[in-house]
Amino acid sequence: MPSTEILRSWFSEQNSRTQSSVFLRLPEAKMWIRDSIALLAIAVPLTAALDNGLALKPPMGWISWERFRCEIDCDQYPNDCISENLYKRIADELVDGGYRDVGYVHVNIDDCWALKERDSNGRMVADPKRFPSGMKGLAKYMHDRGLKLGIYSDAGSKTCAGYPGSRDYEDIDAQTYADWDIDMLKYDGCFIANEADIPNLYMKMTQALNKTGKQIVYSCEWPLYQKNTEPDWGKIAASCNLWRNYDDIADTFESVKRTIDVFVKNQDLYVKHQKPGAFFDPDMLILGDYGLSKDEARVQMAIWAIWGAPLFMSNDLAKIDEDSKKLLLNRGVIGINQDPEGIMGKMIKQARDVRIFAKPILPKSGSSYSFGLALINLSDGGNPQRVNQTASEYGLTDPRGYRITDEFDNLELGIVKPGDFLAIDVNPSGARLLKAVLMFSTPKE
């Protein structure tokens, strides 16, 4: 599909979210980019977000699953087992390493934290050997450091690792987590025999969390497990702050590429339902683990930024390499991801092996937005590929022009107007992330 048609489709989809639809029939192909961008200014999503006032920007933090899985042998692995020692260690690294100060504030426990049986009152019990301070004590440790504690449960009868699930215990578990001062719940979907039960089970936990009066960010895996019927995205967005919709990410670049392919294939659907308080979650950042090169790590970070995706690392921050740390702490990249408009970016064009993505961001002037632009080269060999096209072909059509910066390398690339050419080289299996800030007065020639 030509880039103009992709862009037109994007803004048409955005405009379908308005209370009163506007349709333009443009007489000339050259005009539609400018006018369709203008439509974005009046795009008000019809999809309602979960009304708990939380996650108005994509949540950021750290979660244990990809790196530490379900390791519970603390005798053999005292520093790496699922225990309060691990989460306190990570909390200290988040503070000392500067991660908290750029937004990574959630520390999320995943599966395998509990005993295999509930107590006599039906309440969940944290393993007392591995969590001797209890969850409330661990939450205090986080809060004292300006961090937040997340916990894990499952909408089914058991968690994916075989621990007690929350089915038929939604109210008890929600109140337990509130009593523990938990700030976020990741809610998995294993051990649900009848797929038709999935929506109601997830909405029951929404209601249970709301009844506690405690503000708890709700992370769902509802659409991930609804394999045979089309999920009701409106209900999901009204019930969850964020949701997984594709397979668990693995510590490989192939896994990252598969995730990108799925999101690109469905992007026209997805952009209708993402907004502040309601975010698609393509899963964890695997930067700082073993599977990505420096360039491949840039691909994941660039696309997660453009999508406005939750940014949850799953790594060992005590052993992270400097390149990954620098990338995770990059305020320019985080700024694009955390843009308060919450618009999900889309692929707008492909030039040979380079895919070009755009995300409308602030600041804006009237109906014209600034943009985050990601160029990713999914070819795994050869030389860097050059994309050389006019600014308007990137969607930069305002005659006042745009100031272009390279966010990965903190480079000023100058001011461009719509007819100016912008040449960008992209490494194999690599990415460039640009910020195009709208000029608020016409630049001098």
Image (spheres, rainbow, N blue to C red):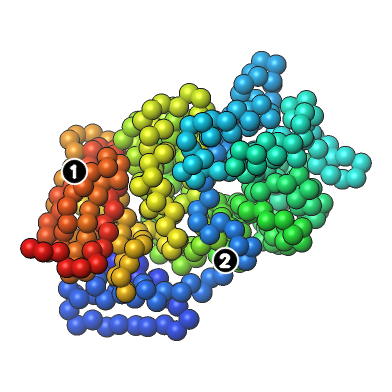
Q: Earlier in the sequence, mark 2 or mark 1?
A: 2
Q: Can residue 2 be seen here?
A: no
Which quadrant is home to the C terminus?
bottom left
Q: Secondary structure at mark 1?
A: strand
Q: CA distance from mark 2 to mark 1?
A: 39 Å
Q: Residue at x 41, y 45 (%)?
A: 258
Which quadrant would residue 22 be assigned to in this image? bottom left
Q: Is residue 363 left or right of residue 186?
A: left
Q: Residue at x 38, y 45 (%)?
A: 331
Q: Secondary structure at mark 2?
A: loop
Which label was assigned to residue 425?
A: 1
Q: Is residue 390 above or below residue 328?
A: below
Relative depth, front residue between 338 and 169 = 338
Q: Amino acid at mark 2?
A: Ala
- Residue reaching furthest to the left: 445
Q: Residue at x 64, y 49 (%)?
A: 184
Q: Can residue 385 be seen here?
A: yes
Q: Is residue 207 left or right of residue 15?
A: right
Which quadrant is home to the N terminus?
bottom left
Q: Position of residue 373 (x, y in %)?
A: 29, 54
10 Å crowding of disc 2: few (<14), some (14-19), many (20+): many
Relative depth, front residue between 406 and 120 = 406
Q: Which residue is mark 2?
A: 49
Q: Amino acid at mark 1?
A: Asp
Q: Position of residue 109 (x, y in %)?
A: 64, 38
Q: Position of residue 282 (x, y in %)?
A: 48, 49
